């Protein structure tokens, strides 16, 4: 159970810290908690690759979970893009503070084969042109306010995703 921010960053500028999350792991978050990857020239990477039978779950720690229970996973500019892969995971009940289950700010992670659902705002929020090479491939993005929110002339690679039952828009630019 995470009760605050988990910062995935190296303590030395220009270096990268790596977080590997194994298949079947369930990460539970208290209100206001999030994972933040990269910070002020200190790089970070997450390798979270589950399987179809043993996904990695990012979810609320509440007894009765609701959208917005926790903040989400934030990929900053200092994300080590080539080593950051999110695959066969479930993201749910994040998005507090008008954010998203997955928030990408000037980073280019690979996000594929995931279920991204029940965010209080966006399932995935991508901003800044530096995030143009983000890869969103074959995700199921459902039951959010916005499925994918794009801001600031960003044009990520979006292909093969299923977007449905998002209350406002599937994709908003």
Image: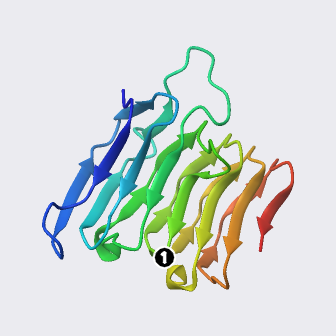
Label 1 element class = loop
The picture places residue 143, in percent across and down from the top left corner, at: 75, 43
Farthest residue toward the top? Answer: 63
Q: Residues within 10 Å of mark 1 (few under 14, many from 20)?
A: many
The picture places residue 43, in percent across and down from the top left corner, at: 25, 68
Tell me what residue is drawn at x 60 percent, y 49 percent: 116
Q: Is residue 159 left or right of residue 85?
A: right
Instruction: Name the quarter where the N terminus is drawn.
Output: top left
Position of residue 119 relative to residue 161, above or below, is above
Q: Is residue 47 left or right of residue 34?
A: left
- The quarter holding residue 129 reads bottom right
Tell me what residue is drawn at x 67 percent, y 28 percent: 66
Q: Viewer-proximal residue, 48 or 11?
A: 11
Q: How many numbered circles does the render carry?
A: 1
Tell me what residue is drawn at x 45 percent, y 75 percent: 108
Q: Is residue 161 left or right of residue 34?
A: right
Q: Viewer-proximal residue, 10 or 145?
A: 10
- The quarter holding residue 126 reads bottom right
Farthest residue toward the right? Answer: 168
The picture places residue 124, in percent across and down from the top left corner, at: 62, 59
Position of residue 5 relative to residue 163, above or below, is above
Q: Viewer-proximal residue, 13 or 88?
A: 13
Tell me what residue is drawn at x 49 percent, y 23 percent: 61
Instruction: Name the quarter where the C terminus is drawn.
Output: bottom right
Farthest residue toward the front? Answer: 40
The picture places residue 54, in percent across and down from the top left corner, at: 39, 38
Q: Tell me the residue that label 1 is attached to.
A: 106
Q: What colour scheme was applied to this rendering of the protein? A: rainbow
Q: Is residue 136 left or right of residue 140?
A: left
Position of residue 19 relative to residue 41, above or below, is above
């Amino acid at each position: 159970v995470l009760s605050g921010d988990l910062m995935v960053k190296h303590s030395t500028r220009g270096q990268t810290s790596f977080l590997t999350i194994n298949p079947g792991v369930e990460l539970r978050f208290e209100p206001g908690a999030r994972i933040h990857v990269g910070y002020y020239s200190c790089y970070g990477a997450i390798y979270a690759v589950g399987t179809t039978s043993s996904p990695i779950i990012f979810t609320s720690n509440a007894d009765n979970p609701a959208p917005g229970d926790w903040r989400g996973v934030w990929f900053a500019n200092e994300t080590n893009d080539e080593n950051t892969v999110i695959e066969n995971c479930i993201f749910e009940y994040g998005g507090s503070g008008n954010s998203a289950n997955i928030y990408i700010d000037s980073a280019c992670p690979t996000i594929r084969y995931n279920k991204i659902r029940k965010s209080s705002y966006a399932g995935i929020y991508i901003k800044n042109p530096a995030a143009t090479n983000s890869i969103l491939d074959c995700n199921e993005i459902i039951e959010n306010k916005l499925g994918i929110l794009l801001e600031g002339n960003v044009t990520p690679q979006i292909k093969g995703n299923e977007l449905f039952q998002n209350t406002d828009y599937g994709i908003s630019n």
